[in-house]
Image (cartoon, grey):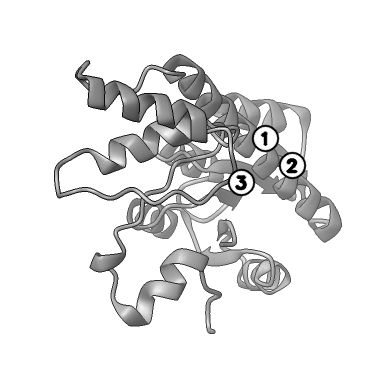
Amino acid sequence: MPATLLIVDDEKNTREGLGLALEDSYDVYLASGAEEAFNLMDAETFDVVLTDLRMAGKSGLKVIDHALVLSNQPICIMMTAYGNVETAVEAMRRGAFDFLTKPVNLEKLEIVIKRALQTRSMESENVQLQERLEQKYSFTGIVGNSPSLVEVLDKVKLVAPSKATILLEGETGTGKELIAQSIHQNSDRSRKAFVPVHCAALATNLLESELFGHEKGA
């Protein structure tokens, strides 16, 4: 699914122009000022917030402050027509990823956004990798030492490195998902996320969108 992008600018032409330029690559939301941006950030999860510095009412620095106290912190990029060293330093000190002067060069903007998303992805992968390394062969959540369980865990170690499709069968509550997690943790794919999907809980008309994503307007 495309990354979500919030553009905050009180200049309508700039706001809508950037939205049109980026909507093919990102899921774009627009806000005409800081207060509207606060409401959107509280209601939605954004990957990137692109905000103007000087706006009517609260400034873009307040937008950054609000963004960086959220549980899912977006990447913040500041833009302004009043570029100077002091402003750039303050924006970066507040937590901005980068600083662009207006009129914004679209090619440079897309490069900055992609670089920011790549940095975020690498940070996430590093955290996941560390967690996987800490859990390697720990069989988290699985308790017991009966011969039958030991046999199952030996099979987990055997099949985990393979690319085979594995079917786990068992009654409700017997630990099928824990075994699936253990297979993932001990596989070459462990640095990626483990994503369980409860297919029975998905509406038929939403199944494809949930599994494979969708594009806005499709």
Q: Residue at x 33, y 25 (%)?
A: 151
Residue 119: % across, % down: 67, 35
Amino acid residing under circle 1: Thr
Residue type at the position of mark 3? Leu
Up/down of 62 relative to 106, above or below = above
Tell me, yes or no, whether the two marked residues, 1 and 2, touch with CB atoms within 8 Å: yes
In front: 184, or 45? 184
* Residue tagged 3: 53
Q: Which amino acid, by three-letter code, is at mark 2?
A: Arg
Categorize mark 1 by other alpha carbons within 10 Å: few (<14), some (14-19), many (20+): few
Q: Residue 146, located in which quarter of the rendered image?
A: top left
In the drawing, what numbered circle is on residue 32?
none
Q: Nearer the viewer, mark 1 or mark 3?
A: 1
Residue 22 as seen in the image, left or right of residue 35:
right
Q: Is residue 91 visible?
A: yes
List x then y, in percent, for residue 26: 63, 64
Q: Which residue in the protein does label 1 denote?
A: 119
Determine the image quadrant of residue 87.
top right
Q: Is residue 181 rendered to the left or right of residue 169?
A: right
Q: Residues within 10 Å of mark 2 (few under 14, many from 20)?
A: few
